[in-house]
Image (tube, rainbow, N blue to C red):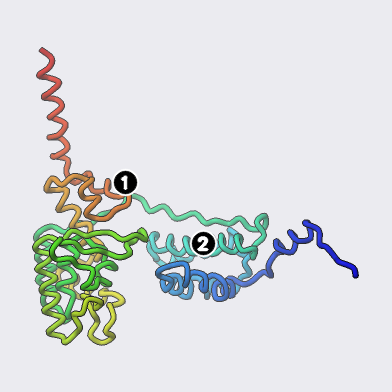
Amino acid sequence: MFFSFKSDDETRSKHHRPQPCLTLSLFFDEHYFPHVKVAKKESKHDWSTFNTHLRASLGHYKLDELTNPVLDVWVREQVVAGYQRSTINKHIFLMNRLLNLARHWGHIQHNANQVNLRRLPLGDYKQRFLSPEEIERLLIHAHRSSHPHLYNFIRLLLLTGARKGEARTMRWLDINRDKKIWTVPVSKNGRSRRVVLSGAALEVLDDCRATVERLGLSIEAKAYVFTNPRTLQPYDSFYAAWYLVRSAAGLDDVRIHDLRHTYASLLVNRGVSIYEVQTLLGHSSVQMTQRYAHLSPDRLHSRAELVGKIVCSSGG
């Protein structure tokens, strides 16, 4: 009886044999998307972005044909079409992710295509904070909205600084009224976080419960605070109703996320430290909160004067 033994070189070559070169669409459908459905909490954004912005223009290219000239044209066409640079950068991020995984999984030779698109420069970050008068105007028109939850949703974001996705999927069991804490099971950074609830925020939640009862919806612990009466699930978004309300209020440049910025600005302008704001917003690093530091120059000047008084009084 004869035994055949493969050399180490033969074994290595078998495991590292290049995969057949796929088109971008085939790679996305058969490899990338099945992977992210398991690996990512939210995969629907990748699916939507690919089908809307990549499949028609780039999906027919083989992976090793996606060179810099091809992708530069793709980016340029989006700029000409009028897409915001921040939006195009999200598309670029997905493309880079696709190419990196294709290389990692052996669908692209590592020495064949080292394309990595650079994101477009965005310039200075523009922040939008609502003034007290604008907040009042927004809430007046939100209260007139036919949407059953929008008014309370907006108030809760203004009173907690929560992200819209956190509030959209809030359940009654996440709220501890005795401790005045709302626990977000999974936040943007993948970890849970605790949101401090003020007395006003708790009153909004009382109004939410009254709305739920009026609509005949469940108030069981596992039920969503902002349940869609038609689907009995959380809303996919509040955008349609939001756009109508902000337009009626004359605030067409305000995004829902600006309610979170407004919460932070109100805190900083009333003397709350950046470190406390960091905790209240659930930022993983203080660098993310530093964008609000410029909002209290008078407070910083008064703190600098403290040192001046000490030094001058010690000078004799």
Badge 1 crowding class, 10 Å Cα cut-off, few under 14, some 14 to 19, many 20 or more, is: few
Would you place residue 256 above or below residue 284 in this image? below
> Residue 256's spot in the image, x, y percent?
24, 66
Residue 275 left/right relative to 11: left
Of labels 1 and 2, earlier in sequence is 2
Would you place residue 260 above or below residue 171 in this image? above
Which picture quadrant has residue 44? bottom left
Identify the residue at the far top of this view. Answer: 316
> Residue 27's spot in the image, x, y percent?
58, 71
At 53% from the left and 72% from the top, the residue drawn is 57
Say what secondary structure mark 2 lies in: helix
> Residue 245's spot in the image, x, y percent?
18, 73
The C terminus lies in quadrant: top left
Reading the image, the residue beneath label 2 is 97
Q: Give the residue type that dot 1 points to.
A: Gln
> Residue 274's spot in the image, x, y percent?
22, 45
Q: Give the residue type that dot 2 points to.
A: Arg
At 73% from the left and 59% from the top, the residue drawn is 12
Say what secondary structure mark 1 lies in: helix
Residue 50 left/right relative to 142: right
Q: Are marks 1 and 2 in contact (CB under 8 Å)?
A: no
